[in-house]
Amino acid sequence: MPGETVWLFGLPCSGKTTLAEGLIGPNTVHLDGDYLRNTLNSDLGFSKEDRTENLRRAAGIAQALNEQGFDVVASFITPYRSQRELIDEKLEDVSFVYVNAPVEVCEDRDVKGMYERARNGEIDGFTGVDAPFEEPEEVELEVRTATRSKEAGIETINRELALKFDPSHIFIGRWQPLHDGHRTIIDSAADNGKDVIIAIRDTELSEENPFTAKERRELIEDVYADHPNVETMIIPDVDTVAIGRNVGYSVVSVPEEVAQISGTDTRNRYGKRELLAGRHLED
């Protein structure tokens, strides 16, 4: 099945790369303007013609990746409407996201000092200073990064482009109890705006499983009370969960001390009453 492309455009330092990095999934390639400028397109300048050629090449790469089944997140200034039309014509399935931030906000974020250098005449043709940025006449999707957090922006893009990137992650386990090792995995999706379902296996009570499914659900909902993108559900117990103790650790890099966390050790260190009272490995 062919892949799809999400094309983030906006002023320098508007937040395109930051948002793009939060949208990268296991089958997604991130094409970034700075990287291509320093590699494949290092022969190009910043005239309108060279800018257009830079984007034409980037769109060609995105097209090739899509044809191979990869999704692409592209983050380029793309200042001219004609350039966006070119990309739209070249790519079969592309969604444009306007990353909108006022130029003064972008300049405040500019740790490289590019805006200042452009205003001092050290850089020619810098978008937002002495080169134009043409506002889109019609906005497919707009994210205002001056007034919204990175997490909110990523959540908006995931929600609005749900057909482009499936944002749902389901985590199945006993969660006896929910500890920092579990949370590291769940947070890797939840904090990036993904929709998360925590499925709680309805295990029989025993010394190894001292909490009822209802008690575990209440604990988890308390922990994630400020995450509207996290839901819980109780499922019948199963004989086997295909991914065992190291659930997710092969996909998400975690510190060694987290990888070694044991639910059994946690229960031995904290009594049931303390855990139910909300003490979740806070030491």
Image (tube, rainbow, N blue to C red):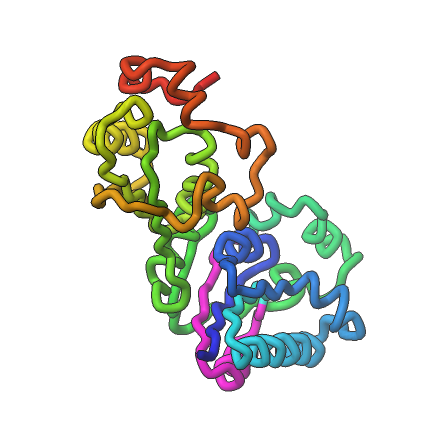
Is residue 24 rendered to the left or right of residue 267? right
Q: Position of residue 32 (x, y in %)?
A: 63, 63
User: Is residue 226 shown above or below 195?
Assistant: above
- Residue 4: x, y in percent? 46, 73
Residue 35 is covered by the magenta coloring: no
Residue 260 placement, left or right of 230 = right
Q: Residue at x 57, y 43 (%)?
A: 253
> Is residue 97 on the magenta stretch?
yes
Question: What span is in magenta?
Answer: 78-102
Asked whether 183 or 92 is in front, the reply is 183
Q: Is residue 210 above or below residue 197?
A: above
Residue 101 in view: no
Observer able to see residue 71: yes
Nearer-the-camera pick, 107 or 145 = 145
Coordinates of residue 84 in the picture (x, y in percent): 52, 77
Nearer-the-camera pick, 42 or 233: 233
- Left/right placement of residue 221 relative to residue 181 reads left
Residue 29, above or below 224: below
Task: Name which quarter of the figure residue 42 lies in.
Answer: bottom right
* Residue at the image position 76 percent from the left and 74 percent from the top: 44
Image mark count: 0
Residue 146 screen position, x and y as percent: 47, 47
Q: Quadrant of the N terminus?
A: bottom left
**Image point 27% across, 19% down: which residue?**
276
